[in-house]
Image (tube, rainbow, N blue to C red):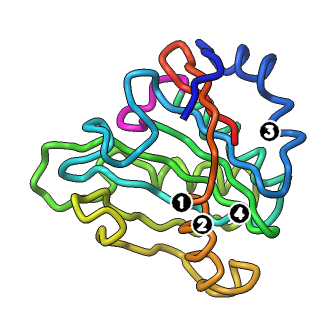
Amino acid sequence: MKRVDEVADRESFESRHGHVLDEGRRTSALRVFRSDVQPKWEDPGNSGHGAGKWTVAVRDEAVSRAAFRLALEAMMEGMAGVNGLISSSKRGLHMLVLWTQPHGTSSGEQDFFGIRSLIEHISQTLMVSLPVKFKAHTSEGAQGNQRKHHMRPADYPGGLKMAAGFMQHCQSNRTHKTINAGPNLVEAA
């Protein structure tokens, strides 16, 4: 992956990269990660007890852009535990993915950083249902534990198999560019 820029806050992101989000191709991905964390699950900041990714299925492009901006605002304002944010689209399927850091608690709580509350806030703000699932980043990679919330096949164009296949395709078949953002890193595919 190649870094392409740095941004210090949401305003600088919007002025320099908002057009990437607004004019994104149907098969594009936009990534914003903290500069001290590489956007891969093997990075120590993205692996360990409790680390993982929260995937939100979004029905359309306009909602996807708005949800990304609200999540980016929370991340840029210092929401604890969020290392990165990805907005991707392929074949009409839109996804918002938040990567979270490990936490040292042994309570078994996957949502240590309040991601469900953030997604609920975004859902209420946009007045849409946003199904979300968690997948732990483990040493086995793709074999991580998965916990689903509010998931229904009707939430995905083409059903759940298409959503799973889309995520696998995104992770393995893309060339990425990276924008290092003040405390955050931005990438565009």
CA distance separating discs 3 and 4: 15 Å
Q: Position of residue 156 (x, y in %)?
A: 70, 78
Q: Residue at x 29, y 36 (%)?
A: 45
Residue type pointed to by label 3:
Leu
> Does the magenta-highlighted stretch encompass residue 35?
no
**Camera-side residue: 9 or 130?**
9
Q: Which residues are magenta?
A: 76-83
User: Which element carries disc 3, helix, strand or loop?
Assistant: helix
* The N terminus - image quarter: top right
User: Which element carries disc 1, helix, strand or loop?
Assistant: helix
Circle 2 residues within 10 Å: few <14, some 14–19, many ≥20: few
- Observer-side mark, 3 or 4, equals 3
Residue type pointed to by label 2:
His
Residue type pointed to by label 1:
Ser
The residue indicated by pointer 3 is 21
- Which mark is drawn over residue 169? 2
Indicate which disc, 3 or 4, sits on the residue closer to the N terminus: 3
Circle 3 residues within 10 Å: few <14, some 14–19, many ≥20: many
Residue type pointed to by label 4:
Val
Q: Quadrant of residue 175?
A: top right
- Which mark is drawn over residue 102? none
Indicate which disc, 3 or 2, sits on the residue closer to the N terminus: 3
